[in-house]
């Protein structure tokens, strides 16, 4: 049995952790329980805004 590796960070480190996960081809999670901050340090309005920011990180890597 194998388990997928899922990365998640805390506060602003979340964005470096996501970038590292993408580089390694691993999954990641994002949500208000991980960080309230967007990559530029602004406060996220909701989970959707965090998901959109994480998707941008993923799309830039592809």
Image (tube, rainbow, N blue to C red):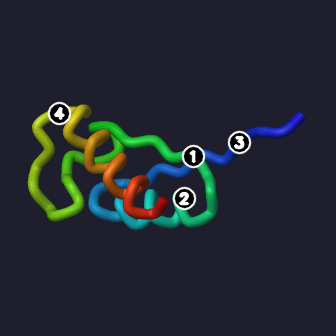
Q: Return the mark for residue 46.
A: 4
In primary-sequence order, the first of circles 1 and 2 is 2
- Quadrant of the image containing the N terminus: top right
State left or right for residue 49 relative to residue 12: left
Q: Residues within 10 Å of mark 1 (few under 14, many from 20)?
A: few
| Secondary element at image label 2 | helix
The residue indicated by pointer 3 is 4
The residue indicated by pointer 1 is 27
| Secondary element at image label 4 | loop
Which residue is painted at 21% across and 46% down in the image? 36
Residue at mark 1 to residue at mark 2: CA–CA distance: 6 Å
| Secondary element at image label 3 | loop
The residue indicated by pointer 2 is 21
State left or right for residue 4 relative to residue 31: right
Q: Residues within 10 Å of mark 3 (few under 14, many from 20)?
A: few
Which residue is painted at 16% across and 64% down in the image? 40
In primary-sequence order, the first of circles 4 and 1 is 1
Residue at mark 2 to residue at mark 3: CA–CA distance: 12 Å
In primary-sequence order, the first of circles 4 and 3 is 3
Contact? badges 3 and 1 (CB < 8 Å): yes
Which residue is painted at 14% across and 44% down in the image? 44
Residue at mark 2 to residue at mark 4: CA–CA distance: 22 Å
Contact? badges 2 and 4 (CB < 8 Å): no
Contact? badges 2 and 3 (CB < 8 Å): no
Q: Position of residue 17 (x, y in %)?
A: 46, 62
| Secondary element at image label 1 | strand
Q: Quadrant of residue 10?
A: bottom left
In primary-sequence order, the first of circles 2 and 4 is 2
């Amino acid at each position: 049995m194998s388990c997928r590796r899922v990365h998640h960070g805390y506060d602003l480190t979340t964005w470096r952790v996501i970038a590292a996960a993408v580089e390694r081809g691993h999954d990641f999670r994002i949500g208000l329980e991980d960080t309230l901050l967007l990559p530029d340090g602004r406060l996220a309005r909701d989970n959707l805004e965090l998901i959109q920011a994480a998707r941008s990180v993923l799309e830039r890597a592809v």
